[in-house]
Amino acid sequence: MDQDVPEVRFDPERAVRIFPRPVAKHAVLVPIPLTESGSEIPTFILAEWGDLQVFYGSYYGIVQGGEVIYGSAKDQWENMHSPITPGYWVKTSVPRAYRATEPCRIVTMIPSDDDGIREANFVLKVDDLIVRQPGGEVQHIKAEKFEGIYYTDDEAVLLGLIHMTDEQFAAWAVEMVRELVPSN
């Protein structure tokens, strides 16, 4: 049972910066629909990993192969990514993370359908990463997916990323993908 796995809170003392691989992402802003009285209508999408995502405000749909494969709340997306050309973005924020040393559970806050916030529990295995994005959101990354999304420690050292400020990294990431995206 997930509740039997101990819950952990993000420990900033254990965390180090992790650097996202600069990948151009095609994302489109999806304005939230409104009723005639001006109330927002929740939008639901099925994410590529099989979970239902619910949005209570405008969000970005991340497009791959002509389909939206997942979404990200508008403010969160814009705080973590930089635009390259219209419709294309690159993640430029530098989260902090550390590896789980035992099976554990993290709790993430997710907007609920009653305009409140609900908790979502995620169980992590040893070596999965506990991540805090610059905006404060705590997430997890499965160990086997990490190297496809972020540079390893050795790569970050080799590329000199560990010596960059977050702002320098953001500028570097933008330059890495600028020539790879279609121009409009």
Image: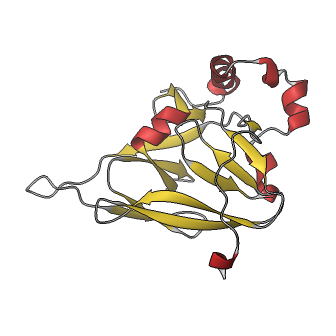
Quarter of the figure with the N terminus: bottom right
Q: In which quarter of the image is residue 35?
A: bottom left
Q: Position of residue 156 (x, y in %)?
A: 84, 30
170 on left or right of 87: right
In the rendering, at what x and y percent does residue 74 appear? 40, 42
Left of 80 or right of it: where is 130? right
Residue at point 45% right, 30% down? 86
User: Dividing the picture into quarters, in which one does residue 113 lie?
Assistant: bottom left
- The number of discs equals 0
Q: Is residue 142 above or below residue 14?
A: below
Q: Which of 181 and 10 is in front in this view?
A: 10
Q: Residue at x 78, y 57 (%)?
A: 128
Look at the image and tell me whether residue 68 can be seen.
no
In the image, 114: left or right of 78?
left
Give the residue at the far left of this rendering.
37
| Residue 122 visible here | yes
Q: In which quarter of the image is residue 110?
A: bottom left
Residue name at image x 57 percent, y 70 percent: 50
Could you tell me residue 90's position as x and y percent?
60, 33
Residue 168 versus residue 180 in the image, above or below: above
